[in-house]
Image: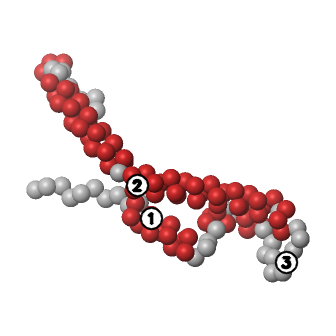
Amino acid sequence: MSKPPPQIPLPLSSLLHDLAVIRAHDLDLYAILSETTANIPTVTSVDSDINTSPALETSLENSREFVSHARAALKIKSSGELEKLGSRIERIRATMEDVLESIPGEDGEDSRKGI
């Protein structure tokens, strides 16, 4: 019997879909996740001090950083580099396992005992 494929806790396709939904709804993810932004007063009218609020500036900076990281992740995903590196790592791992198996252990024991 073959093993079932390993479960990925946060599949990239689901993550990308979630990011698209968040972007489509113009949500401020940092404001949702952070307890510190709960203290930001809700502004219902135009206020001259809204652009100088430190909490708003922090929220904006964190949102920009999040978007930057999300875009970098999408760029890596679409470039195919991740798959190339993954297959290279897998080939190296298989080679190292073969080398380990060829090294005799103490008293004829398996050399992979420490792994």
Dot 3 amino acid type:
Val
Dot 2 amino acid type:
Lys
Please provide percent x and percent y for residue 11: 38, 61
Residue furthest to the left in view is 1
As measured in the structure, the alpha-carbon distance from the residue carrying label 3 to the one carrying label 2 is 41 Å
**In the image: residue 39, left or right of residue 98:** right
Q: Do the residues labelled 1 and 3 touch (CB within 8 Å)?
A: no
Camera sees residue 110:
no
Picture residue at 59% right of the left edge, 57% below the top: 66
Quadrant in which the N terminus appears: bottom left
Asked if 17 appears above or below 112 in the picture, the reply is below
Pointer 2: residues within 10 angstroms few (<14), some, or many (20+)?
Answer: some
| Chain-order first, disc 3 or disc 2 | 3
Quadrant in which the C terminus appears: top left
Pointer 1: residues within 10 angstroms few (<14), some, or many (20+)?
Answer: some
| Chain-order first, disc 1 or disc 2 | 1
| Chain-order first, disc 1 or disc 3 | 1
- Residue on which disc 3 sits: 46
Picture residue at 50% right of the left edge, 66% below the top: 19
Camera sees residue 42:
yes
